[in-house]
Image: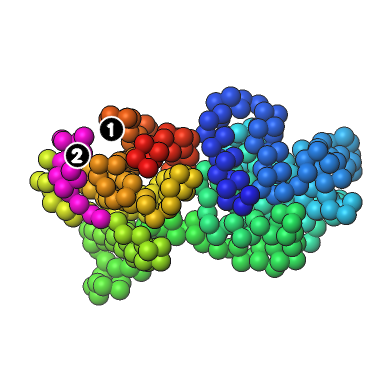
């Protein structure tokens, strides 16, 4: 199983059972051990590979334990410290990792609460764990750029030298990305001055500074939207997928008559989003067990993103209501009556895979 698929399955488990994971031990059993086994590929039942409750006395500190040590050839390679699901992660929670990193051969320290995984090494000073992670992974919001680096830490392709050589760049790229996010969400005064200077050659008074703060935030949002649209078009061309943009009034047989009327009034100025395409690809991945993937088609409307069999609006599989803060998945019963189910993440669609397959089988 690819690590992407393993991560998605563990993410579903986190969503389904997070309320029951009320202790650190429950988090280890339900999430951390499956991650070590299915994502990293180590045998959690073999103490020569995965050693729980690893102890290495450090100075006056006797009997302190790190939750797990990953070993290769009898040498400790990675140390893992676990917290309860949902617990905040910061450097103050990694005291054992700091001490053990110094007295073992480990070059990778991992701090996790099950959902978030932070990977550390010793870039700043040899044998002393850095205070900032070089790689961060959120199982419910996967950064695709992190997966190739994570792959290097798996048992089958373990490549410590490659990880360490890339770690410094990863560490600073990650930090800069966070800074860019903050600047785009809430432009700083210095950032506003730089942007304003590129289009406005007069002194920046208090009134104009306030004006350009608003303008800069708006321009950043529009720039992001433009980049998303470019990526979306490229992705669609690369996949050979055609998404019809239609008003719901053109969607013959639709059960959403109110949506039809609204869409007709607003016209057909419809933009397909990356979230909708991700949801569409998940539905295609589910439905491929029943029919060839090319039979799964999409029609985007103002009210919803429709997914159909054979591009036939009389064969609705499901609908994605993603054009609002709360996302909904619309599932069809035998009478083609839609039931809307609130979802937190797009990957939650996998939880309804059997209902989606049943809808496909009805028409196939």
Q: Which residues are magenta?
A: 244-260
Looking at this view, is 170 or 10 the one in front? 10
Q: Which residue has dot 1 on it?
A: 336
Task: Tell me, yes or no, whether the two marked residues, 1 and 2, touch with CB atoms within 8 Å.
Answer: yes
Say which of 35 and 282 sits in front. Answer: 282
Is 146 located above or below residue 20 in the figure?
below
Q: Does the stretch in magenta take in 254? A: yes
Is 35 situated above or below 25? below
Name the residue: 30% across, 41% down.
316
The residue tagged with tag 2: helix, strand or loop?
loop
Give the vertical position of 238 relative to 218 (above or below): below
What residue lies at 80% left-to-right and 53% top-to-bottom? 77
Q: In the rendered image, which quarter is residue 170 located in?
A: bottom right
Instruction: Spot the residue most to the front.
Output: 364
Identify which residue is drawn at 71% across, 38% down.
33
The answer to whether residue 117 is left or right of residue 144 is right
Query: Marks 1/2: CA distance?
Result: 9 Å
Q: Which mark is residue 253?
A: 2
The residue at 74%/62% (across/down) is 159
């Amino acid at each position: 199983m690819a690590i992407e698929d393993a991560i998605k399955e563990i993410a579903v488990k986190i969503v389904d059972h997070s309320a029951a994971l009320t202790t650190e031990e429950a988090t280890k059993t339900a999430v951390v051990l499956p991650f070590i086994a299915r994502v990293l590929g180590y045998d959690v039942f073999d103490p020569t590979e995965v050693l729980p409750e690893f102890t290495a006395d450090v100075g006056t500190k006797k009997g302190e334990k790190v939750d797990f040590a990953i070993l290769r050839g009898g040498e400790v390679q990675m140390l893992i410290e676990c917290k309860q699901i949902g617990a905040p992660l910061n450097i103050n929670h990694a005291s054992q990792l700091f001490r053990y990193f110094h007295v073992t051969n480990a070059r990778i320290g991992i701090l996790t609460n099950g959902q978030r995984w932070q990977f550390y090494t010793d870039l700043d000073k040899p044998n002393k764990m850095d205070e900032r992670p070089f790689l961060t992974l959120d199982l419910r919001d996967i950064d695709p750029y992190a997966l190739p680096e994570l792959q290097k830490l798996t048992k089958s392709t373990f490549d410590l030298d490659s990880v360490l050589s890339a770690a410094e760049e990863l560490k600073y790229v990650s930090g800069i990305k966070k800074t860019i996010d903050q600047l785009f969400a809430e432009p700083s005064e210095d950032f506003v001055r730089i942007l304003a200077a590129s289009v406005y050659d007069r002194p920046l008074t208090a009134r104009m500074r306030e004006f350009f703060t608003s303008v800069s935030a708006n321009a950043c949002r529009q720039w992001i939207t433009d980049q998303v649209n470019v990526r979306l078009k490229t992705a669609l061309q690369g996949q050979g997928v055609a998404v019809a943009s239609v008003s719901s009034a053109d969607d013959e047989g639709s059960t959403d008559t109110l949506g039809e009327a609204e869409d007709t009034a607003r016209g057909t100025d419809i933009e397909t989003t990356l979230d909708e395409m991700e949801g569409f690809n998940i539905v295609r991945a589910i439905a491929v067990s029943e029919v060839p993937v090319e039979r799964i088609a999409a029609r985007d409307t103002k009210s919803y993103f429709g997914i159909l069999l054979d591009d036939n609006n009389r064969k609705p599989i499901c609908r994605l209501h993603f054009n609002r803060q709360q996302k909904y998945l619309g599932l069809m019963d035998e009478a083609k009556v839609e039931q809307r189910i609130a979802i937190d993440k797009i990957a939650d669609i996998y939880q309804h895979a059997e209902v989606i397959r049943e809808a496909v089988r009805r028409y196939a």
